[in-house]
Image: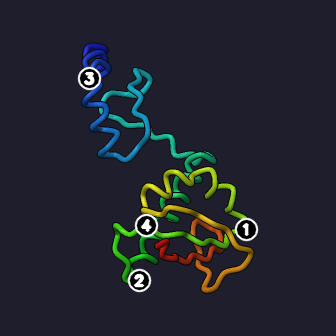
Amino acid sequence: SSKDFSALSARDELIGIIADEVNVKEVVISEQVSPGEVSLDINLTDELREEGFVREFIRAVQSARREAGLNPHDVMKLIVSAPDAREIIERNAGEIKQATTVGDISFVDAGSDPQEIGGHRISISLQATG
């Protein structure tokens, strides 16, 4: 009913919880959807693809750190070979550095042991900074 719609629309906290639990960026309450039904926009935008790639890249860096037996608090230099994903990594360098405790990201033309990350062939290596 429109009464339920109005009550839910006014509950920002509840909408935030719904967004977190369903893992979506935005919850839109609409009278165009029948009561008891949910409508999902499942279109993947370039922005969503990039966010997904960044999450996968961060996981790969964290995995490389674990495999190397490095302490999560040690600040490292990240050396990357990612010719077709360099722009994405550069654009998101702040988030990547913060999430991985990497102090610096440098790029090389070719690396060893490339892996598939978000549809890109990428080599990652870590180096102690001091």
In the image, residue 28 sits, relative to residue 41, either above or below, namely above
Taking the spot 58% from the left edge, 65% from the top edge, the residue there is: 118
Mark 3, other Cα within 10 Å: few <14 / some 14–19 / many ≥20: few
Query: Label 4 belongs to which residue?
Result: 75
Residue 11 is tagged as: 3
Q: CA distance from mark 2 to mark 4?
A: 16 Å
| Quarter occupied by the N terminus | top left
Pointer 2 with pointer 4, Cβ within 8 A: no
Q: Which of 115 and 123 lies nearest the eye of the viewer?
A: 123
Q: CA distance from mark 1 to mark 2?
A: 24 Å
Q: CA distance from mark 3 to mark 1?
A: 46 Å
Pointer 4 with pointer 3, Cβ within 8 A: no
Q: Which of 103 and 124 lies nearest the eye of the viewer?
A: 103
Residue 67 is tagged as: 2
Q: How is the image coloured?
A: rainbow
Q: CA distance from mark 4 to mark 3?
A: 42 Å
Residue 83 is tagged as: 1
Quarter residue 82 falls in: bottom right
Quarter residue 34 falls in: top left
Q: Which is in the foreground here, disc 4 or disc 3?
A: 4
Secondary structure of the residue carrying numbered label 3: loop
Taking the spot 60% from the left edge, 85% from the top edge, the residue there is: 113
Residue type at mark 4 is: Val
Mark 4, other Cα within 10 Å: few <14 / some 14–19 / many ≥20: some
Residue 30: x %, y % from top left: 41, 23
Residue type at mark 2 is: Glu
Q: Which is in the foreground here, disc 1 or disc 4?
A: 4
Residue 76: x %, y % from top left: 47, 69
